[in-house]
Image (cartoon, rainbow, N blue to C red):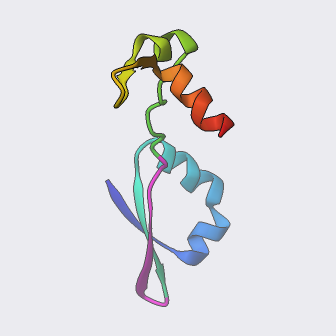
């Protein structure tokens, strides 16, 4: 649901508007009868999976000289260069 509010309403009723936004209400803020911004609750992005050293070792990389190394070793090598 989108609700129209003025910039003065936003300033004076911010706690109430914040609660409504967190419940899913979107707002269009007007200043001097012109829409100036749209407010929406922040949707956090899904957490990225943290890879462990064991995960990196499970992925092997084949180099040009046919030598197989694990991803963890490759990262160490590039870090130390």
Relative placement, left or right, of 17 versus 64 is right
Q: Which residue lies furthest to the front in this view?
A: 65
Figure disc tally: 0
The picture quadrant where one finds residue 52 is: top right
- The residue depicted at 41 percent of the width and 87 percent of the height is 34
Relative horizontal placement of residue 72, taking residue 59 as reference (left or right): right
Residue 62 position, x and y percent, is 34, 23
Is 35 one of the magenta-colored residues? yes
Q: Position of residue 11 (x, y in %)?
A: 65, 69
The C terminus appears in which quarter of the rendering? top right
Is 11 drawn above or below residue 56 in the view shown?
A: below
Q: In which quarter of the image is residue 64?
A: top left
Where does the image place residue 14, in percent across and percent down from the top left?
63, 59
Most extreme residue toward the bottom, as rendered? Answer: 32
One can see residue 16 in this view: yes
The reply to whether residue 50 is in sight is no
Q: Is 57 or 78 nearer to us in this picture? A: 78
Q: Does the magenta stretch include residue 27?
A: no
Residue 14 shown left or right of residue 37 in the figure: right
- Picture layout, residue 44 above or below residue 49: below
Stretch in magenta: 32-42
Q: Is residue 2 above or below residue 55?
A: below
Residue nearest the viewer, comparing 2 with 69: 69
Q: How far across and down, in percent of the image, does residue 71 sit?
A: 47, 22
User: Which is more toward the observer, 27 or 50?
Assistant: 50
Figure check: 66 above or below 9 = above
Residue ID at (48%, 30%): 47
Which residue is found at the position 37% from the left and 23% from the top?
61
Residue at the spot 57% in from the left edge and 70% down from the top edge: 9
């Amino acid at each position: 649901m989108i609700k129209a509010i003025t910039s003065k309403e936003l300033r004076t009723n911010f706690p109430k508007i914040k609660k409504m936004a967190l419940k899913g209400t979107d707002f269009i803020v007007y200043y001097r009868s012109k829409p100036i911004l749209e407010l929406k609750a922040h949707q956090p992005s899904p957490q990225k999976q943290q890879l462990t050293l064991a995960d990196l070792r499970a992925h092997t990389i084949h180099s040009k000289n046919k030598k197989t190394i694990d991803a963890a070793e490759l990262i160490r090598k590039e870090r130390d260069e």
